[in-house]
Image (tube, rainbow, N blue to C red):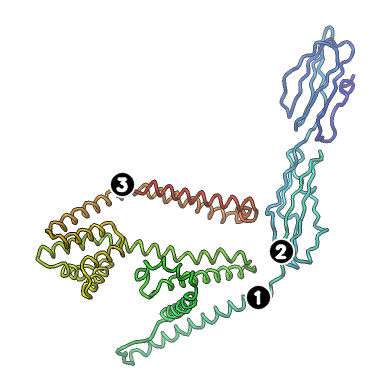
């Protein structure tokens, strides 16, 4: 007797996505039997049946099954094995890459290029992928929904949609822009060659010419610098008409005279930010043009904002460096003043001596104080203005000490010796603290840079890896959350590492 007579369904010729129930009916003469389910080659537990009744066996999970039965007759046992039951309830995997594609009118789209479809049971299913590509009209602009569908042999189906944005063909505009850029580059190259030729000719005839006493000629770089300054002056005059921008410019008053001497008003610093934003925007447009693409309006925001806020980093860096120089040279200024007092000189003479003995920012500040005293301001007012400009704790102590001495009198040499000693000890403590926390600061800087370097490396290896982060709503939300978490992380780490003295 064959195995088919025992099982109501001996095997499945094709996979099923439904639960499979098999009834095993023992023949007459079998006293008892045991059965077990073998799934994907792994045998399950033997289940005994102590009579001759049929049993229903249920298989409900994905896999390849067989049923093995050991039946017992009066004086012997037999083994019965079924065929294979294939159950596939898992949908196939369909990878379509980017969810949004862009193409220009007249270009060709290959719908199956880069598509992957496979199933754990059936293997590669790329040939089974069906699309609605032939039903879409790519001769008009707009967004077209390209639908991919794939099914396995069990009937499990998966569908994914790719939004194809058909754009107008800008080849003519791109050609004109590229021609203009190439023309400008050719003119610049011609000017450079002409300049080099003029320099060589000047070298040949210089030995036969007499040098002028005053040379008012400007180099190419100086000319460009002069043009840029004129542009800043023009933009600054335009920005002055805005009350909001004038209020915004007041926060840059503390940078005047520190960042660059050519900036006379704080609005000039804002004008520099505006011009830098347009320069970065022009660079972004140029890079897109080289790639035969047009910069979208929303894509113009990021390069402009990046260029607009880049000068802020330079301003802050120069201002901090200026303050560090002041803080480091202040002790030397106190020593010079204290020595001047010991030799019997007045406060005004001590301030004048600092301007001659020292250089750098501290000398400039003491020159301002000396001029203010020369114009009739009192010592108290001059040092209060100095403390307000510098905003250093040491200068505040110095101003308070001089104010008290000027009103009540006292031994100025002892006071300045005490200030000198306290500043020396504080500077020594700062140096010791810097040496102790140097390795920790390096680790913190490395932790700050690791996420940025990771993003750069992955973007170079796989430029489309982070595309879903700014092309989908969920990705955009996750990007904002990650940026906020990174900012909070930097804030708390800096707070933890900062040591106040």
Front one among 500 and 87: 500
Residue at the image point whose x is 69% and y is 75% from the top: 172
Q: Residues within 10 Å of mark 1 (few under 14, many from 20)?
A: few
Q: Secondary structure under badge 3?
A: helix
Q: Which residue is mark 1?
A: 175
Work out whether mark 1 precedes mark 3 in sequence or the reverse, and give the earlier one: 1
Could you tell me how far apart the alpha carbons at marks 1 and 3 are, in whole angstroms?
A: 60 Å
Work out whether mark 1 precedes mark 2 in sequence or the reverse, and give the earlier one: 2
| Foreground tag (1 vs 3) | 3
In the picture provided, is 262 more to the left or to the right than 367?
right
Work out whether mark 2 precedes mark 3 in sequence or the reverse, and give the earlier one: 2
Q: Secondary structure under badge 1?
A: helix
Give residue 443's position: percent from left, percent from top: 40, 48
Could you tell me how far apart the alpha carbons at marks 1 and 2 are, in whole angstroms?
A: 18 Å
In the picture provided, is 136 more to the left or to the right than 193?
right
Give residue 453's position: percent from left, percent from top: 50, 53
Using the image, determine if residue 424 lies above or below residue 292. above
Q: Which residue is mark 2?
A: 103
Tell me the quadrant of the picture where the N terminus can be found: top right
Front one among 365 and 314: 365
Q: Residue furthest front?
A: 407
- Asked whether the residues under the numbered discs 2 and 3 touch, taking CB atoms below 8 Å apart as contact, a structural biologist would say no
Give residue 311's position: percent from left, percent from top: 45, 66
Residue at the image point whose x is 82% and y is 9% from the top: 76
Q: Which residue is mark 3?
A: 436
Using the image, determine if residue 491 lies above or below residue 36. below
Q: Residue furthest top?
A: 75
Could you tell me how far apart the alpha carbons at marks 2 and 3 are, in whole angstroms?
A: 58 Å
Could you say which disc has been placed on residue 289 in the image?
A: none
């Amino acid at each position: 007797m064959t195995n088919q007579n025992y099982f109501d369904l001996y095997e499945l010729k094709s996979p099923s996505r439904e639960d499979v129930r098999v009834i095993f009916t023992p023949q007459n003469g079998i006293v008892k039997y045991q059965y077990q389910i073998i799934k994907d080659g792994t045998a399950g537990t033997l289940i005994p049946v102590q009579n001759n009744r049929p049993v229903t066996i249920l298989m409900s999970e994905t896999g390849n099954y067989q049923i093995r039965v050991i039946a017992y007759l009066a004086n012997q046992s037999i083994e019965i094995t079924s065929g294979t039951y294939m159950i596939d309830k898992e949908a196939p995997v369909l990878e379509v890459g980017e969810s949004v594609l862009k193409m220009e009118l007249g270009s060709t789209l290959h719908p199956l290029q880069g598509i992957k479809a496979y199933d754990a049971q059936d293997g590669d299913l790329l040939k089974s992928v069906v699309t609605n590509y032939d039903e879409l009209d790519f001769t008009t602009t707009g967004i077209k929904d390209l639908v991919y569908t794939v099914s396995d042999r069990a009937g499990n189906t998966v569908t994914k949609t790719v939004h194809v944005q058909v754009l107008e063909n800008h080849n003519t505009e791109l050609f004109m822009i590229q021609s203009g850029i190439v023309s400008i580059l050719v003119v610049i190259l011609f000017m450079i060659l002409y300049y080099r030729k003029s320099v060589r000719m000047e070298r040949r005839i210089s030995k036969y010419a007499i040098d002028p006493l005053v040379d008012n000629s400007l180099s190419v770089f100086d000319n460009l610098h002069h043009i840029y300054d004129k542009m800043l002056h023009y933009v600054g005059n335009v920005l002055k008409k805005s009350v909001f921008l004038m209020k915004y410019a007041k926060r840059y008053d503390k940078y005047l005279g520190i960042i660059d001497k050519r900036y006379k008003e704080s609005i000039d610093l804002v004008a520099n930010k505006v011009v830098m934003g347009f320069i970065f925007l022009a660079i972004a447009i140029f890079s897109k043009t080289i790639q035969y693409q047009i910069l979208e309006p929303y894509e113009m925001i990021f390069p402009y904002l990046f260029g607009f806020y880049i000068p802020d980093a330079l301003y802050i860096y120069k201002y901090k460096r200026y303050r560090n120089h002041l803080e480091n040279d202040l002790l030397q200024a106190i020593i010079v003043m204290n020595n001047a007092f010991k030799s019997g000189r007045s406060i005004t003479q001590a301030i004048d001596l600092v301007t001659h003995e020292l250089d750098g920012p501290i000398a400039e500040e003491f020159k301002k104080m000396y001029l203010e005293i020369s114009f009739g301001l009192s010592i108290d007012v001059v040092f209060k203005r100095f403390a307000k400009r510098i905003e250093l704790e040491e200068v505040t102590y110095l101003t308070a000490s001089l104010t008290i001495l000027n009103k009540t009198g006292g031994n100025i040499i002892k006071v300045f010796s005490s200030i000198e000693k306290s500043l020396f000890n504080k500077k020594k403590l700062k140096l010791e603290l810097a040496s102790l926390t140097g390795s920790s600061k390096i680790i913190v800087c490395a932790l700050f840079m690791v996420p940025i370097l990771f993003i750069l490396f992955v973007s170079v290896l796989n430029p489309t890896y982070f595309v879903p982060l700014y092309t989908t709503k969920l990705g955009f939300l996750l990007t904002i959350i990650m940026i906020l978490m990174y900012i909070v992380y930097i804030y708390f780490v800096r707070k933890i590492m900062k040591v106040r003295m």
